[in-house]
Amino acid sequence: MAPQSVISTTLQLLRDKLVDNSFLSHPLFRAIEGAGNLVKVSGGLRVEQPVIFGEHSSITQLSSGFEPVSMAVTDPFQSAKFEFSNFTQPIILNAVEKAANKGDLAVVNILESKMRNVMLGLKKEVSKQVIRGNSSVLTSFQTLNGMTVASSTGWLEAIATNTQQNVVGGLDKATYRSQNWFNNFKDSGGTLSLSHLDELFIQCQIRNPSGAFPDILLMSPNCFAAFQNLQQSLVRYTSNSDRASLDADMVGMWRGARIYVEPNLGFTAAAPAKAVSAYALSSDQFQLYADTDGFFNVSEMQPVPGTATEAAQVFCRMQLVTGHLASHGVLIDAEA
């Protein structure tokens, strides 16, 4: 039977390997990390993201150089406040398993199997919540889906910008609509149109403070199939070697954005009752904040009182945040 020191060391080594190979393998989280927007912080109850809603001071045009300069200032800054989401999942090893898997290598193998299962389960649940907002256990984690009854804090609404009213980060879209605190959206009317997709991209680009187009395009399986059939000649595909060096899940590129098939998309929005087909996202305008003590941190294996088992806890404390909603968009009703 492997000593406790071997078990503890194994858990920590596996943690680093499996965070990269499981959770950060999701296109959205991989893009966040690649853009340098995986932010580690120490403590705190929430993330306060500065949001700029105007100009700090006025410009004065000079002719002679003696004109009075306006010194009037305003405070253009607000803070979007995002509470941390805290969650944990145990890795459990019972006495029978330990007895049946004698030796360091055997214990390492069974721990890796269990930890991989936990990491993939966490990835699946977080992805479901972020994309669709329908996790039953991670309801405090932010969701991009702002189109169902239970997602009044979701980022992306499938309605005109002048009627959006969700509250994101504590800021009401209806109150701050004129300051670009809304998302872009396009209805493709039942059939995917590349012109509609282009319009959505342009809306995001002209409203992004950096002037960048969306660089992540998540599509439902049906939407991507329609996209392939519509304009194969205009879609840039990557070779197998390119995919290996970039990321294996990317299925193509459009207007500079990496395309990924997202199985959680294609669900029907509450209003309008149409399929949510694609998210166009700008990775420079969102971040994943994680507590340094809560980014898949693994505790020591400890006996569980009253049982013949030991358990370690994988603890997470993180949140998805944005400081500029109008850099992102949603395409609906484009499943054919």
Image (cartoon, grey):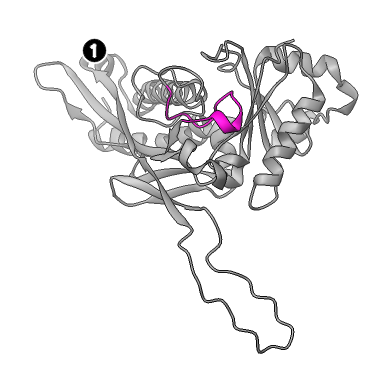
Q: Is residue 161 magenta?
A: yes
The C terminus appears in which quarter of the rendering?
Answer: top right
Name the main secondary structure of what is drawn in magenta: loop
Where 262 falls versus 35 (above or below)? above
In the image shown, does 313 or 95 lie closer to the viewer?
Answer: 313
In the image shown, does 95 or 271 lie closer to the viewer?
Answer: 271
**Residue 65 seen:** yes
Q: Residue furthest left?
A: 306
Q: Residue furthest front?
A: 67
x and y percent of residue 321 in the render?
Answer: 46, 41
Residues in magenta, as a range? 151-165
Counting labels gives 1
In the image shown, does 218 or 62 lie closer to the viewer?
Answer: 62
- Residue at image x 45%, y 22%? 133
Q: Looking at the picture, which amino acid does disc 1 mark?
A: Val
The image quadrant that residue 335 belongs to is: top right
- Residue at image x 80%, y 31%? 238
The image quadrant that residue 312 belongs to is: top left
In the image shown, does 306 or 94 lie closer to the viewer?
Answer: 306
**Residue 214 seen:** no
- Horizontal side of 37 relative to 232 (left or right) equals left
x and y percent of residue 75 in the render?
Answer: 45, 62
x and y percent of residue 50 in the render?
Answer: 45, 53
Q: Is residue 238 magenta?
A: no
Secondary structure of the residue carrying tag 1 is helix
- Horizontal side of 122 relative to 87 (left or right) equals right
x and y percent of residue 97 in the render?
Answer: 28, 15
Q: Which residue is mark 1?
A: 96
